[in-house]
Structures are given as C-alpha cells and as structure tokens.
Amino acid sequence: MGSLIRSFLGPELYRVYKTDTTAGFQYVPNAMESWGDRIISFVRLFYKTTVWTSPLVGAYLLWRGYLSVDGAASLVRFAGWLGALAAGAAVLRAFGRMANPQYRVFMEVLGGDTTDPERRRQLAGYDFDMAAWPIDFAAQRVLEIPAGGETLTSSLSDEGLLGLPTRLLTYCVVHTIGRRLMYPGSIGFMRSLLAPALLEGRTRLVEELGGKRHALLARDGNRIDTMFVDRRRDGNSPNGKTLVICCEGNAGFYEIGATSAPLEAGYSVLGWNHPGFAGSSGVPLPESEQSAIAAVMEFAESQLGFRQQDTILYAWSIGGYTASWAAMTHPGVGGVVLDATFDDVLPLAVARMPPSWNSLVQLTCRRHLDLNNSRLLRHYPGPVLLIRRSQDEVITVTEGEVGTNRANDLLLQLMEHRFPSLLDTSSRRLLERWARGDAVIQAEVLSEAGVDDELCQSLLASYVSEHSASYPLGIGADMDSGTLSQLVIYLASRLMIEMEGTHCSPMSGSFFRLPWNLPQGTNGFVYLNKPGDGQTDN
C-alpha cells in the first residue's frame, strides 16, 4: 500500500541522465501510466478552459436554464463524474508506475534521506518535476536598500477610498491578462509547447557541460529553478573564475536562453527561471521577481563562493529589470550587461495597446508592473554595458525605427545621471543624434565630433586621480564645447554598442563582452575583461 501511495503522489519523471558507465535515456511510461497522464491532462485542460471562458460558459448555462435548482444538481453530478474520472486516472497511473522498474528505483532514491550527499548525487541523475526537488538553499538575507533606493514597485501614492474602484480594476487586469501579456512564458500552454525543448536544453547543460540543477527557496516562499555550470577549475576556460548570472526575457528560459553566449565564452554561469516559468513556482510580478533574484544572488555568494566583484549580471529583454534591481541592492557586483532592454516598460506597453486603453495601461503598469530600469540603475555605481539590436522589433515604440528603441532612452538617462556636467545644449543635441541614429549616423557623429580616444582617456584618468570615480562625475564644468562633444560621444560609444540582428537573434560567444570601466588613475584603464576576449582599451 505504501508503494501505491508513493506512486500515486510521485512526480513526473522525464529523463535518467548518463553516468560514467551508462548512457542517458528518456523515461518512457508504460501504457497504464501513459493513459492515466492523458486523462488527467484532459481534465486539467477542461478545467482551465472553463475558468478562462467562465463569462461565456455562465451565459450559455443561463440560456440553457442550468442556473436553477434542477440545473445546479445536474452540474454537480457532472462535476462529480469528472472528478471520479480524474481520480480513477490517477490510480491507473499509480499502478503503471509501480509496474515500471525505472520509476520504482527513482522513487527509492527520492524517498530516501535527501540530506545525505550520496543520495543527493544519485537524485541529481534524474530529471523530474521540480516541485518535488528537495530545497538546496533557502534565502535568509534581508536586503538593505541603498539610500534613495526604490522600495516600492508602484510609483503612485495612496488615493484613499476615491481610488478604490481603479485599484480593484487594475488588480483584476494584472492578475488576468496583464501579467500574462507581460510574461507569456508563464502561460501553461507556452510551458507545455516548449517542454521538449526545455528538457533537451537541460540535458545538454547537465550531460555535456556538467551543469548542476538546484532548487532555491526565496523569502516569499517561491521555489526558484536554477542551473549552475562551474568553470573555475577548467584549464580551457580562462574566464571561469568570473560568474555570469543570466536574467531571461519574458518568454526566455535558462535551458534555451541567454546562458548560451557566456557559456560559449568560457565563463562560469548561473541561470534561473522567472517565478511561474518551467520549474519555478509562483507568478511573475515585480515583488516575486525581486525576491527571486535576491535568492539567486545570496546563493551565488554564500553557497557557490563567488565574491560580488567576481560576479557579472547579464540580462536580456525584460530580464533587465531583475538585473537592475540586483545591481542596486548589490552595488559591489563587477558589472551589468543589458541586452535588448528598455528604460521603462510603460511606453512599450502603451504603444502595443489600443489608444482608448491608455489610461488603464498606465495605471496598471504604475501600480503593479512598474518596471523602470533607469530609475534602479541610478543607484548602481559600477560599469554598465548596453547592447542595442539593430533590427529590434520588440523594444522599439515604432517597429522598424531604431530611433524609437528604448535602449537609446536608457543610455540618455544613464549619461544624464553619471556625467551631468558634460551635457550642455550642443553636446546634448549631439548625444541625442548619436543615440537615436543607426550605425551609419553614429559613425558620422563620431567623425564630426573628432573624437580623440587618447585625449578622452587622459582627461578621464586625470579627473579620477584628482577627484574620484564615484558617480555622478563633475568632469566637464570648465571645458570648451569641442572637448565636451568629444567626451560625450566617447563615453556613449563605451556605454552602448550595437549588435546586428532582431530582438530574438541569439548572441554568439565571440560577441559577448563585459562592460568598460572608468580609469583607475593616471596609469591607464582597468577592465573587467581578460586579454583576448574581444574588447580593447580604446
């Protein structure tokens, strides 16, 4: 009976990974387990479809006369039969699992003492439903928000009772279609559609790259699915002592997402999935995103042993929000690389909705989905690199117009905060033209400004030696307009680079690079990059 109960409650098993002596293989359920799974999946799909279409279902039931005493009794009987069908399918599946020797061995490992290192090593040889994975690390640290940092996700003040109707409306919007439009990777259909690709990606990470999967418990109770590839002892990976933490896009997963470029470039990599994505529990909202990245950062430092200065935050698309939040709350990290991301999600959300919805979109975003990377990055004192995609169709307000790419606005606001004294009327106009121009226009501006790299390096090094490298810098207060223009374009070209491709074009390992840093004195510049990784001191 105990074996039947364990099989009844047990998780889905997907794969048995290869070992030094055995080949890996996909788990194949027998006929009883397979049919049980199909029936349970059908009942689950029926239930979710009914919930999502409940207004239409309710109208149909009213029209057919089911919203009466007799009709209600019929509905209860139907629900009872459906429940009995699901229960019977679960029992059938349990018997099928009991008859499968591979599943029985797996349950023996899972049911043992998972605090035992050998037992944990054996368990890591299986790919199964992450909800049953034992917690590897529980976050404990309470983050200290820097002075002036953002502690609220909403930029709206309390409106009292008069604002109650709009608060209820925006709450309903964000918890129905809002967060699903913002994070489509959390939709069940998307997860089911991508499940084979995600399993294939995990298999590659584990079997070919030696990746280790971990379950983290965030402070809000969500379980965060992570994958760590350690290159510190790999003699063929000179960048292995640097950890790159990857923050994925709104339909990205560490299995098939941003982790590929830094892995190809030879870095140690820690990938994680948003709450509600793949093996992570919860729903993707700013508060849960903050809690998730906080757990990942604490795990990297406390469990994996990486110092903050040896850690790089790399984000793609909407992952820029969690990377910016982590940079603000962990100011000692070595650098931030933001690829195909934005300054503020609101202009993009407004541009993709009907004009009549503008007020509702603005209220919903500001109250519940206030993803403002620019505001967070002001509190990070380290090096930042922005990567703009030349044909980005997602982060542009007007598709196909590079001048409306919101990475341009993020650059402009970053320059405004970090180098305010460099921006007079003339240099500001020149910066705007460079930031919003394509590669041809940027080359023209660079030529017009007559940028002398050696002069700009010398001026910055002298300023840092006499003052400090803390932002905002006061450099530029006593310079002529020509020198201001040179410095502004020089700095802009170090803070933002362009990659040929669309929003979802994969980045190659040869293109991936770490951010440029300010000079550390008159002896030259200090970079986070190691020699030969594709970035020079110019």
Image (cartoon, rainbow, N blue to C red):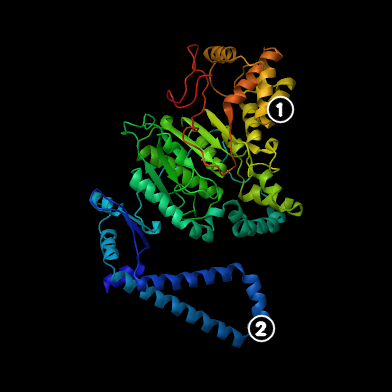
Residue 433 is tagged as: 1
**Amino acid residing under circle 2:** Arg
Q: Is residue 406 left or right of residue 339?
A: right
Q: Could you tell me residue 209's position as x and y percent? A: 35, 43
Q: Which residue is mark 2?
A: 64
Q: Is residue 275 above or below residue 247?
A: below
Image point 65% across, 24% down: which residue?
443
- Quarter residue 179 falls in: bottom right
Farthest right residue?
A: 356
Few, some or many residues within 10 Å of mark 2 (<14, 14–19, 20+): few
Q: Could you tell me residue 302's position as x and y percent? A: 36, 39
Q: Nearer the viewer, residue 520 or 337?
A: 337
- Quarter residue 84 falls in: bottom left
Q: Nearer the viewer, residue 493 or 476?
A: 493
Secondary structure under the numbered disc 1 in the rendered image: helix
User: Can the viewer see residue 216 in this picture?
Assistant: no
